Amino acid sequence: MSDQATSREAQGPAAAPTQEESLYAVRQKVYVRAVSGLFAKWRWGLVWFTQLLFYGLCWIPWNGRQAVLFHVVERKFYIFGWVFWPQDVFFLAILLIISAYALFFFTAIAGRLWCGYACPQTVYTEIFMWIEQKIEGDRNKRMKLDKSDMSGRKARVKGLKYAAWIALSLWTGFTFVGYFTPIRELVQSALTLSFGPWELFWILFYSSFTYLMAGVMREQVCKYMCPYARFQGVMFDPDTLVITYDEERGEPRGARKKGVEPRALGKGDCVDCGICVQVCPTGIDIRDGMQYECIGCAACIDACDQVMEKMNYPKGLIRYSTENAVKKHWGMKEILAHVMRPRTLIYGTILGVVTLAFVWGLATRSPLRVDIIRDRASLAREVADGYIENAYRLQVMNMTEAPRSFALTLEGAEGLRMVGPETIEIGPATTQAVTIQAQIPYGVLEPGSHGIHVVVQALDNAKVRVKEHTTFIMPR
Amino acid sequence: MNKLIEVLWPSFLVAGLAEIVFFTVINPQELYFFGEPVRVSAIATYSIGFFGFWLICGASSLTTLFFQRGSEEINHPERFQDS
């Protein structure tokens, strides 16, 4: 690494117009040239989609509360009509498994789709670069501005950019915290400047993070900090669609006049304009082959297609293709025929099964949960009329968002009777503790432990019923 | 700078995971601190918990980094000043 660093330094200022303080490795600032085209449209579509979701979802009301709220203080996650409790951690685990397999599945088919189009790092970098472009101008203007000496204009332009970035970052941090603390309360705190210390801290923390990641570090996050970038390679195989430079068609590269037949000059289709390198957000040259730095954003495809169009050459010198397709000169049909292969089928099947399990689990989730704790003070005691009594504490959870009444009964032994409330009303999304006693006449059962059941039944819906097992201890 | 990030970043990631797992399983209101129930707010407990995890994970990263030095680096630290 140090060798590389010294050789780069040796190239001098001409090769490295702006060299920043090194975070990981000596870095040459990447001036990304803006690009338009089919894939850029897709990326912007996803920027809009994910960010409307992120900035908007926290403002939607639902049942008199925030529709999506991860209320860490109450330890309840509200997602539209659902309320998730810590007991539902199972769903979270399944959701993580689904996300992981979806990632594997799409990566196996078409490479780093997530990185190129939907990852927050890509999305925020895209937005931050858009701001930069609007304020500082295009790539050449930005490079010139950075090289120029400090002047009133430079200070103004840079200051404006930083101000816009900071404003967006603060809004992002505020929105983020708004998913954990009701956002309308946060607005109230903002108006009166009375944030809780930790709320303020996390808003600023997330804001600085956004600023640092999207404004300053950019491609370095993907290259050095992202764990996924390091292991995504294991999901690739020779049939995975990746961004590919058609070396056979392009080489030998070189400049030429428009309208000249390249083969007559002994040249390939690549005009060596370098635009594919200028548009690359990670600053690599796709013509060097597949590299782990490539986030699969397809900016070079868009850029190259425009150049090919101007030259009247067929598009697709850089395109989505597979290793096998390039080697064996396959067309789109053969590539698509190879999408179905053991790897994708296995990932796809697991993904499908787990997703079904998730949906099924959610659909059949009981809105009532009962936990029984035996009274720890005394196992059993004798009461009037020759009865033996055991005491239990029930934790009854009403997981719906409306108050509900439940009937309590005991079953499972001869002569069993219950002392305690026969019906209870529990508020919306609340847990209530209820103490009940079970009594059985002495001598009806053998001494020892016997299984009995506590039945909790909603009064308004016969299907909402929980039968929990516990034990009754009959002394000698 | 380089080493600082090497310690702070992986430990940040792992601390985030640890935080989620730990507080999903354990309710901060049921924690005891030197025999006293925790009295600070839930958000404060979560936050302090996160930094606690980060600190522990950071200590582990630091130890890894410390033991990773080769004999050359230990015997001749002056040759490794710049890295």
Image (cartoon, rainbow, N blue to C red):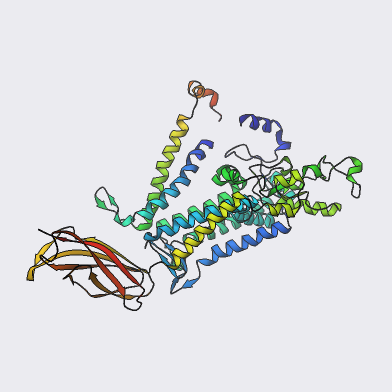
Name the residue furthest bottom. A460
Residue A44, x across and y down, in percent: 66, 60
Q: Is residue A115 above or below residue A375?
A: above
Name the residue furthest left. A385
Q: Is residue A381 above or below residue A266?
A: below
Name the one closer to the observer, B73 or A302: A302
Left or right side of A416 for A347? right
Residue A191, x across and y down, in percent: 46, 67
Do we see residue A41 in this rendering? yes
Name the one closer to the observer, A204 or A264: A264
Do we see residue A162 in this rendering? no
Q: Quadrant of residue A27?
A: top right
Left or right side of A70 for A427? left
Quadrant of the rendering where the C terminus of chain A is positioned? bottom left
Name the one closer to the observer, A53 or A352: A352
Q: Tally the marks.
A: 0
Residue A173, x across and y down, in percent: 51, 58
- Residue drawn at x 49%, y 42% as measured from the top left: B10
- Residue drawn at x 61%, y 30% as measured from the top left: A2
Quadrant of the rendering where the N terminus of chain A is positioned? top right
Left or right side of B44 for A374? left
Residue A43, x across and y down, in percent: 66, 58
